Amino acid sequence: MFFHTVFSDHVFNRKLLTLAFPITLQSLMLALVAAADAVMLGKLNQDAMAAVSLATQIQFVQNMLLGAITAGVGVLGAQYWGKKDRRVLEDIFGISVRESIFISLAFFAGCCFVPEKLMLLFAHDRILVELGAEYLKIASWSYLLTGVSQCYLAVMRVTDHASRSAWISSGAVILNIILNLIFIFGLFGLPAMGIRGAALATVLARLIELLWCIGSSFSADFIALKFRAVVVFNKVLVADFWRYTLPILASYLLWGIGFTAYTAIMGHMGRDAAAANSIAAVVRDLMCCLCNGIAVGSGIMIGNELGAGKLEMGREYGKRAMVLSFLIGGFSSCVILASIPLVSSYMKLTPLAHEYMVGMFLILSVYMIGRCVCTVVINGVFSAGGDTMFDMYSLIVCMWGIALPCAFIGAFWLQLPVLVIYGCTCLDEVGKIPWVLHHFKKYKWVKDITRDS
């Protein structure tokens, strides 16, 4: 009966699709530009590809910090938009931009003035350090712009302009890829710039993205950035903002470091294991784009209802999102299993690496159910009501307390088979499901966290 209710509510489904599809598209496009960089620079030479791959780990750290800030905008912004309080939403926008500028300035300064020292964190080979530093000096200007543009895009998503946000982000990605081709290889009579061309393409794409965001913000019903909101310090609102943002930041850091550790552990299992794991990681990241879109979209919808004081409707939307998370997980599992023959025929692997890859895909098909449920319910439903601490606790217990120690002990002490170790790295998401459902039924997330202006 409940499944029938989910699919028969056309208003809910249409609004969720309107929000989730653009966000899913953005995730796919961002994954595409990373792949395009690797392919183009790999065509140039192996050292260039490796150096830029290492250099962009700095951007990965910055993106985690900025992602926490934009997630905070999503939590508070969705509720105040549901309450129809534009003035407070303008202030939230200003706070996010101010904090993002501080972060961006720090990364810009490091990458522009001491890029060699930053590269030494990731590589000791002299050539890789020099090539990576060459990239960072130019790309540092894009790091200065990214923070502000991401805040614009986050505000667009929570104010019923997710499609514009997707157009801008996707347009910037396409422009980045085209400029990569032109600058890296020297098309249309321009000199071939190699790594410096890839960095310059990134800067120009980010500049166009920011200008597009600023121009869009002056359209009707959009929230424009007010100088007052950036420079005025609203102590109560800032405290609220960081109250919900700091746990998200802690979760992002725990998750990012944990996943890096997973990759390092699999890398120590041998070349065949590392190759199979890299393929499984690409498929996993592509499949996660859908559940990420549903999580953000459902979180905005639920937040709108809770902020408007419609707690029962927010609870009902949360139940529907939870059911959808299981359905999306099942769909993702079927796609992964169906892709095994296709990937096997395309990838040139040793027999042992192929065996590992097939086994990892089978494990991944189960993992995706847990990943979809946890992503949608924790990052979408719980966060919509300001319940952002649960994700941090669950990562500490399930990833850092169970999955990582099991994988580490199994790999370096017990020397267990590769697929057993890979299964250990997937324990956290599947193991969280009972805990997540138990917490869901407490309905602590059904809460209006707004204040009167």
Image (tube, rainbow, N blue to C red):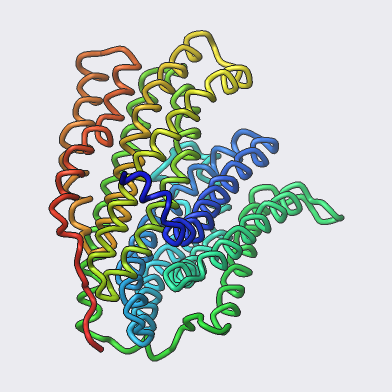
What residue appears at the point 21 percent right and 82 percent down from the top-left corner? 451
- Position of the C terminus by quadrant: bottom left
Q: Is residue 107 visible?
A: yes
| Above or below 112: residue 192 | above
402 vs 425, left or right, is: left
| Above or below 261: residue 416 | above
In front: 61, or 157?
157
In front: 329, or 211?
329
Q: Residue 299: x percent and y percent?
A: 34, 60
| Above or below 37: residue 380 | below
In front: 56, or 110?
56
Q: Residue 345: x percent and y percent?
A: 62, 17
In front: 191, or 262?
262
- Position of the N terminus by quadrant: top left
| Above or below 250: residue 396 | above
Q: Quadrant of residue 255?
A: top left
Q: Quadrant of residue 301?
A: bottom left
Q: How many numbered discs?
A: 0
Q: Give the residue at the far top of this rendering.
A: 351
What residue appears at the point 32 percent right and 55 percent down from the top-left corner? 380
302 vs 24, left or right, is: left
Q: Quadrant of residue 234?
A: bottom left
Q: Give the residue at the far front of this rendering.
A: 1
What residue appears at the point 58 percent right and 50 percent down from the top-left corner? 29
Q: Residue 361: x percent and y percent?
A: 44, 23
Q: Residue 408: x percent and y percent?
A: 23, 26
Q: Is residue 117 visible?
A: no
